[in-house]
Amino acid sequence: MHADPNPKHTPSRCKTVLSVFGSRPEAIKMAPVLSELKALNGIQTRVCFTGQDRDMLEQTLGLFGVDTDYDLEIVRDNSSLFDTTTESLPAIREVMLDAKPDMVMVHGDTTTALSAALAAFYLRVPVAHVEAGLRSFDKWSTWPDEFNRRTIDTIADLHFAPTARARQNLLAEKTPDGSIFVTGNTSVDAAHTIAARQDDFPMLRQRFNNRPLVLLSVHRRENFGRPMEKIFTTVRTWARQNPGCSVIFPVHPNPNITRSARDILGELRNVSLIPPVDYTQSIFLLRNCQFVMTDSGGLQEEAPAFGKPVVILRDTTERPESIENGSAIMTGSDPEKIMTVMTALSNAHSDSYRRMAAAGNPFGDGCAAHRIASIVQRTLAPALVESRRVL
């Protein structure tokens, strides 16, 4: 563990919020909250990073003016869930003993978030869960995310639900109503912030050169193997039938993905297999694509903010709001369904495309981080019940 050599000294009047995360999606969604907390009186923020997606973390947090205080360096390439869990839990405990937080904040459903929530629970430190209440109602899909987020929500003291449906899920599980706050999703905040910069990337733009662009993103464990092969094979067929369109696929470095992508899509002139892009490039591609094909939760939330229809390459989703409001359609890895939807969305003037593009974003208005920070400030301003703590 590498701690800040010049740690910030917290005035006695301040309350410390320790945020723990490991992946780039977590950093993107937590950064707006950390920026808002940083601006508040009486709140001291500390940030712990476990080591996943290291190459992109500094760039992502730098966009929002956020620094890390602890770098645990425990998540490496090809780390198993066993490795991440068994190594992160004691390491996060040491961070908490050093930082002595008044609240621990986690995001979403990663194994890092679960470990941080569990460590906080063992030390009797209150937990705030950003993006609480999402449910697929199938513990194997998404896996292990559904188990992680359900467990975190049983531990959490504050539940920041992105939508009314997420709130209802929590209430159905007997979560105290007073602990639930519908805030919107912070991914929308982050997307709006970066889009306002109007960044341009000529090298990426050359990849599609004003041709209709499809943004493809596939990385989830449940799609490894045959499902991913079916998705890529269908995209290959569509690309051959639509030589005037382009597909850009930022390929996750996991060998389970790169091998299939290279073997099935690598020879197509209008399909670009590129390395993972940073967040500003991702938003650039979102702004300029015609539609999105993804198994990513973040893209499901971000794409409607720019009026981009979403094809969800999964059989279940914990974000059904976009399907219900018409901004997304779920195909799983079924080749016939994928081909039908891709064909329909290839025409930006069709009724089906126009309806999906105009459906709006059910995940928020860009003010979620401000709401979350304000609630944390109101919660921590009164004296906490110190007898709960064993730090």
Image (tube, rainbow, N blue to C red):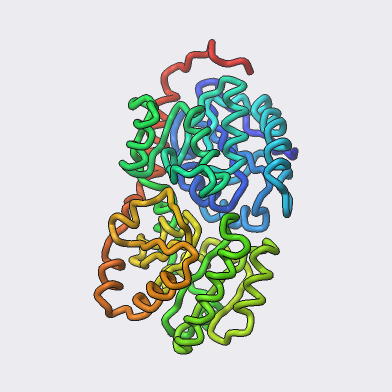
Q: Is residue 149 left or right of residue 361?
A: right
What residue appears at the point 61 percent right and 22 percent down from the top-left corner? 122
Q: Quadrant of residue 184?
A: top left
Measured as percent of width and height from the top left, residue 158 is found at: 43, 30
* 75 or 237, nearer to the observer: 237
Residue nearest the viewer, comparing 300 with 324: 324
Does residue 344 appear left or right of residue 128 in this picture? left
- Position of the N terminus, as image quadrant, is top right
Q: Is residue 62 above or below residue 383?
A: below
At 50% from the left edge and 39% from the top edge, which residue is drawn? Answer: 149
Image mark count? 0
- Residue depicted at x 53% and y 55%: 63
* Residue 300 position in % (x across, y down): 42, 58
Residue 313 in the image: x percent, y percent? 47, 62
Q: Which residue is at a point 57% across and 24% down the rendered structure image?
A: 121
- Up the image or down, 352 lies above or below 153; here it is below
Q: Is residue 9 or residue 22 the one in the foreground?
A: 22
In which quadrant will I find the C terminus?
Answer: top right
Q: Quadrant of residue 168?
A: top left
Q: Position of residue 207 (x, y in %)?
A: 53, 82
Say whether residue 65 is visible: no
Relative to 28, is 126 above or below? above
Asked whether residue 337 appears in the rendered view, the answer is yes
